[in-house]
Amino acid sequence: MASADLRQELDCSICLNIYTDPVTLRCGHNFCRVCIDRVLDTQKGSGVYTCPECRAECQQRPALQRNITLCNIVGSFLSTRPDQEETGIFCTYCIHYPVPAAKSCLHCEASLCDNHLRVHSKSAEHVLSDPTTSLGNRKCSVHKKILEYYCTEDAACICVYCSAGEHRGHKVETLDEASEKKKKKLRNVLQKLSTKREETEKRVQRLQERRRENQKRAAGVTKRVTALFRDIRKQLEDLEKRVLSEISRQEESVSLSVSDLIQQLEIRKDELSRKMRHIEELCNMSDPVTVLQEPDTGDLCDTEGRKRHYNQVHGVGDLDVNLISETLQTGLSDIITGINVWVYVQEPTDILLDVNTAANNIHISGDRKTASRSQINQKRPETPERFQYPQVISTRRFSSGRHYWEVEVSKSWRWRVGMCYPSIDRRGYQSDIGDNNKSWCLCRGYNNQYSVIHDWKEIQLPDNIPYDRVRIYLDYEAGQMSFYSLCDPIRHLHTVTATFTEPLHAALWVMGGCIKISGGVRS
């Protein structure tokens, strides 16, 4: 009721429509600006102007004041009727200004605003519906009567004459009944569609999440590939320097040999020149006694000397292309090994230390990832599996595939990390990893010296590389175990080749401080 009363207060008394640009006269009555201007224009010749509402007179044409408050109220009221506005259907009888229709009369085939709806006929034949532009479709095309029923057999909307004619005997329902039944079916369909939509939304969310993960992974892989190529370029540059250095060394060695031989041959040439001059002098003498009394010049065809100098010339060393090629191939093989590690083994899983093998002079952390040298006897049971010296191996063993694991060694000043067979001795000096033929390790010894050790044999490594974190890579089938320094860029340290005859365990040996497993293994 309040909304209806407000609607009536917003009607212009001249056009009976909602105010358009409302203005106010001195008497306080409001009108549309266009409507009151037309009324005042008709009163111009009479010599007096009157208010159409209260007949208040004015000798001069009254000034029109725009009613801002009323204009805002009209705008607010119209904004609360979006359904009518959105339909785009306007009252058929409001010809001066388009007014949204409130209802459509199927009988009159016209749309009506609230004002015209109040004076519209209320007889039964005037059927009202929501505003529509398809008024002709709401009548029977044969009898021109309003469609009131629905034939369920023919699935057609019919009028009263149709129900008594060609649809006689058919099951007929009112439009409202048939509409409700269809709405019920549609609601069921809607529920199913809603469920499918939710499932689709979940799939979209999963795909979006997968896309984000893929983007994140792509960004990570891009970063790693960039670092990999930077490392490859650095390794290639280092390899180029080593190969060129080897070429220069061999060239210098050959040059020294050739220089020495040239010097010897120059002396030989001077000696021969001196003999030739002496002989020429003898040949030019006229006194036979002097010629005959000259000591013998020796065998001028010194065959042995000539052969010796010939062999010296042809025996001069040349560039050892095989050694250069071997240096190049070994360096490239190391680079390829590093690439294989990156390609085949990227995301490590867990690796744990086996407390049952840990010596009693090392402490194993609760997460079984850190081994620390301890001055306190851990008092673990003495069993055949336990090491005598500060050493421990992993619970997991590897008998196939590619794997790697990483260790932080920056907090230890003497350490060994590597892999060993389970049959390694547990007691005696030969039980340390590297000091037997059943283990391989990377070692930091006295005076910060680094080496790779197997069966007591050491391969010295450069000490100008950071060794804070190291990686051990295993390719079991290929028989390769490689060691890397995880600096920037990652540096390949050494690769050992062997035919593995037993499964391998990760192994740690710590003489001081602690070492920690920071990465795991992956098949």
Image (cartoon, grey):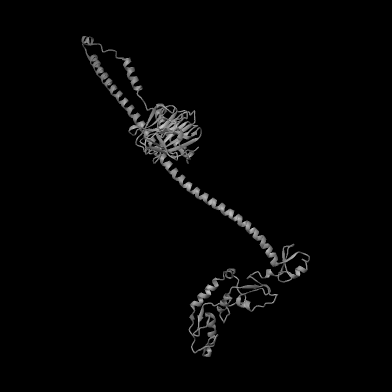
Quarter the N terminus occupies: bottom right
Whether residue 189 is visible, yes or no, is yes
Q: Is residue 355 above or below residue 105?
A: above
The residue located at (63%, 58%) in the rendering is 191
Residue 269 placement: quadrant: top left
- Quarter assignment of residue 134: bottom right
71 and 232: which one is in front? 71
- The x and y percentages for residue 221 are 46, 44
Image position of 249 (left or right of 200) = left
Q: Is residue 216 left or right of residue 171?
A: left
- Rendered location of residue 229, percent (x, y): 43, 41
Q: Nearer the viewer, residue 464 or 289?
A: 464
> Percent x, y for residue 317?
35, 24
User: Residue 152, percent across and down?
Assistant: 73, 63
| Residue name at image x 65 percent, y 60 percent | 186
Observer-nearest of 475 and 359: 359
Viewer can see residue 328: no
